[in-house]
Amino acid sequence: MSVARITKSARTPGSVIVISAPSGSGKSTLVKRLMASVPGLVFSVSYTTRPRRRGERHGKDYFFVSREQFGRMVAAKEFVEWADVHGQWYGTSEQQIRKAQQAGKDVLLDIDVQGHSQVRRRLPDAVSIFLLPPSYRELERRLHERHSDAPEVIRRRLQNARREITRWREYDFLVVNHRLSSALRSLQAVVEAVRVRRQAQQQRAREIQKTFGGKDE
Ligand code: ADP
Ligand code: 5GP
């Protein structure tokens, strides 16, 4: 599916799209593929106090900052939302979002359920997606198969997942990651749907209407 097909007036600000999921659901895998396959979509690079993992790049995956710097940014109200996730702080830069939106780009926020509820309050036009694993057992299997966490960390992630899964009702779209390819298609379809929302298309509709002559009602 070519999401690039959907165009809009350059003057229309982009939309904010939030994606959340219990850890191990396949969110990173899908977000990477979504970003690679959809033009005009910008990834919001969060600030975090957690240590950098091997292969992660500062400014690309996250901005890795100290607790002091993060605290200063909170005090200066630089975050549209921020939360303590598994003992580390994570936050979304308001300026980054605004800049992308003003450039007519849609912005994808990969944030947790606490961040999502703050974004909903602050940006009521934001659209949100909750990604679900097919089952608890499959989530457990994926976390083990990933070989990236110690058994204790996996236990904690599964415990958190039990809490997070209950929050699906707060989201606009629910995508089950059973088969990767069909989950990706669903995510692309959501972006496509966001791009044809009235608020994203109204400038263009007005321009088209003008070509018909007569008064703008
Ligand atoms: P998250 O970012 O949600 O923590 P990952 O993207 O790291 O999850 O995926 C967790 C593991 O599950 C990885 O090993 C990944 O390759 C695997 N995975 C992701 N999606 C699927 C799927 N649809 N079917 C089977 N395995 C998957
Ligand atoms: P990780 O440390 O594994 O990259 O991410 C852990 C969790 O933090 C994930 O659920 C991710 O979505 C969430 N997260 C990443 N950035 C932000 C952010 O800016 N705000 C919030 N609230 N959560 C975030």
Image (cartoon, rainbow, N blue to C red):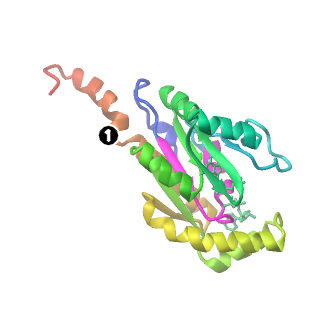
x then y, percent, for residue 152: 80, 73
Magenta region includes residue 21: yes
Q: Residue at x 63, y 78 (%)?
A: 136
In the figure, is residue 183 to the left or right of 171? right
| Residue at x-position 61% and y-position 39% | 74
Q: Which residue is mark 1?
A: 198
Q: Quadrant of residue 205?
A: top left
> In the rendering, at what x and y percent does residue 186 appear?
51, 57
Q: Residue at x 74, y 43 (%)?
A: 67
Magenta residues, start to end: 16-36
Residue 174: give x, y in percent of width and height.
Answer: 48, 63
Q: Secondary structure at mark 1?
A: helix
Identify which residue is drawn at 52% across, 43% down. 2
Quick check: can you spot residue 137? yes
Vertical position of residue 91 compared to residue 101: above or below: below
Q: Quadrant of residue 151?
A: bottom right
Residue 135 in percent (x, y) is at: 60, 77
Image-based side of 205 in relation to 83, left or right: left
Crowd rating for badge 1 (residues with CA inside 10 Å; few <14, some 14–19, many 20+): few
